[in-house]
Amino acid sequence: MAIYSITLNTAILIALGGLLAGTVFARTRDVVTRDGVTIDVIADGKGPLVVLLPSLGRDSEEFDPLAERIANAGFRVLRPQPRGYGRSTGPMQNLTLHDYARDVATVIEHENAGPAVVAGHAFGHFVAKMTAVDYPKLVRAVVLVAAAQKKSDPEVRRMLNIATDNSKPEAKRIPYLQKVFFAPGHDPRIWLTGFHPEVQRAEETARDGTPQKEYWSAGSAPLLDLQAEHDPFRPRSTKTELVNEFGANRVSVVVIPNASHALPVELPRATADAIVAYIRGL
């Protein structure tokens, strides 16, 4: 197990690795279909597969800097957009995490270059874990980006509901956006937009309708628990929660300072560098 904070030296090594990887590949966008479901997929780079999954009610277009940096380090980065956003379509009622995992598996299978490292941000980490449980041969490892502690805090959930409610006045939402998502000194107003209510409702139904025991273990996949220093969903007291449960041989922990629950948007370079360093060490 490695428990550490991303350092300047690590960032320099990753940047050099990206330069040595060679060509920067153009971004593409295509759709993958199966059984009445259409999945809009953004792809960057060439190399071993990395799949990025966005947070609750949001899409992955805001991951552009994150995806580009990982791709430039020598990886092929896929971003399947959630159902209900962009060209991703399919049933939105009575979903479970198994449905979302199947969407991710379909994208990996279509690429025909797996297994993939699946990195899920916030809500996306539930889907990443479920994919590893349901499709173990397609998942090389799981990266949990700003994942919540095992026992959720009702007060944090309450603040989340206010922060993401587009019907509430901006002046009321901003303090909660700051408390829930952003570290001190980071502007929370960038997330006043970007929450898709229909997508959020479907994902909440899937999360709450899937027993935790079905996805929590992520099967037997190696895990990187990528934490943010100020994340209210992950108090510092729970830093080694997954290590204690699944063991140091399986779980690595990285803590990124000066960030909160919106980690990959707040600090995309540090997030990318931590992910790349972990994959290279697998």
Image (tube, grey):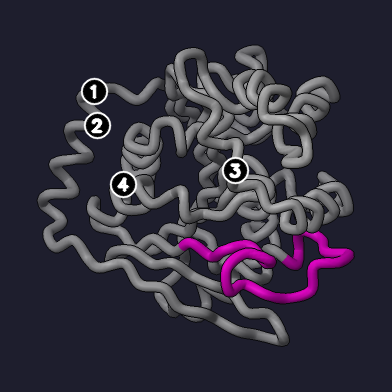
Where disc 1 sits, the SS reads helix
Do labels 2 and 3 touch, CB within 8 Å? no
- Residue 96 occupies which quadrant of the picture? bottom right
x%, y% of residue 135? Answer: 63, 67
Disc nearest the viewer among 4 and 2: 2
C-alpha distance separating marks 4 and 2: 13 Å
Q: Residues within 10 Å of mark 4 (few under 14, many from 20)?
A: few
Q: Is residue 25 visible?
A: yes
User: Foreground residue, 153 or 282?
Assistant: 153
Do labels 2 and 1 touch, CB within 8 Å? yes
Q: Which residue is tagged 4? A: 280
Which residue is pictured at 57% across the width and 43% down the height? 121
C-alpha distance separating marks 1 and 3: 32 Å
x%, y% of residue 169? Answer: 73, 30
Q: Earlier in the sequence, mark 4 or mark 2?
A: 2
* Amino acid type at mark 4: Arg
Which residue is pictured at 13% across the width and 41% down the height? 16
Q: Which residue is tagged 3? A: 193
Check residue 115 for magenta coloring: no
Number of labels in the image equals 4
Q: Which mark is residue 11?
A: 2
Where disc 2 sits, the SS reads helix
The residue segment tinted magenta is: 79-99
Most common secondary structure along the magenta stretch: loop
C-alpha distance separating marks 2 and 1: 5 Å
